Image (cartoon, rainbow, N blue to C red):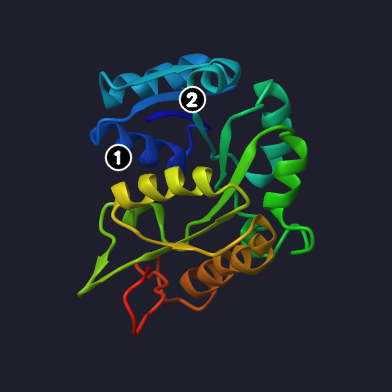
Amino acid sequence: MKIGIIGTGRLGSALGKMWAEKGHSIVFGSRDPDKAKKLATSIGSNASGGTYEETVKFGDIIILAVPWSGAKESIKIAGDLSGKIIVDSTTTAAPHLGGALISVTPSAAEKVAKWAEGADVVKVVHTIGVDSLNKLQFGTQQASLFICGDNLEAKSKVKKLGVDLGFDVIDAGSLKNARLIEPLAMLWIDLAYNQGMGTDIAFKLLRRRKAR
């Protein structure tokens, strides 16, 4: 797939590297294009870097991997997002683990959908540390990845990217259900840091029947 990643932080960098290794074509976007190009060079031939606008023009799927405080402005700078699939991976955690920056109604994903007019937004809630993205197996179980969105085809493509990483991807329904799954990220943060469990933890949906 052609994937554009808005953001060159730890999450965006890690995802881009792993997907590039799986054969996907990656363009990193940054307000500092030289930073994006340097990151791409460190990854190899399947990656390149540029501006937010160049990233959006390239990618069929756009990963929003910036802090929540910069999400609205990043979307504005990115330009026309009509027909694109936007994966909202933002976490609305306040600085210093002080709680949530917004209420769950509407969710962050619903706000992103409003800002990115014409795009199909899929919310992805990463309830795992960035350093554990390459070790998603916990004993006999794979860590679960919860996604939601209103477009079935868009969710199918995002699910494939999650499976490529090694997740057990859970379709949590419509985009409105981001109100239900976004707090899972806040719970993960609290358990990992405030409760002292550490970052090598993940959530798992257990089933008695095989998923359809």
- Which residue shows up at 25% across the image and 58% down it? 135
- What is the residue that sits farthest to the front in this orientation? 212
Q: How far across and how far down the image is residue 194, in percent?
A: 54, 74
Q: How far across and how far down the image is residue 183, in percent?
A: 62, 68
Q: CA distance from mark 1 to mark 2?
A: 16 Å
Foreground mark, 1 or 2? 2
Between discs 1 and 2, the one toward the N terminus: 1
Query: In this view of the protein, which residue sits in the foreground, 190 or 154?
Result: 154
Residue on which disc 2 sits = 59
Q: How many marks?
A: 2
Q: How far across and how far down the image is residue 14, in percent?
A: 37, 41
Q: Residues within 10 Å of mark 2 (few under 14, many from 20)?
A: many
- Which residue shows up at 34% across the image and 85% down it? 208
Q: Which mark is residue 18?
A: 1
- What is the residue that sits farthest to the left in this orientation? 140
**Image quarter of the N terminus:** top left
Does 193 appear above or below 39?
below
Amino acid carrying mark 1 in the image:
Met
Q: Which mark is residue 149?
A: none
- Which residue shows up at 29% across the image and 61% down it? 136
- Res 39 → quadrant: top left
Does 157 appear above or below 144?
above
Does 175 appear above or below 120?
below
Q: Element at badge 1?
A: helix
Q: How far across and how far down the image is residue 211, in percent?
A: 36, 71
- Which residue shows up at 48% across the image and 25% down it? 59
- Res 47 → quadrant: top left
Amino acid carrying mark 2 in the image:
Gly
Q: Element at badge 2?
A: loop
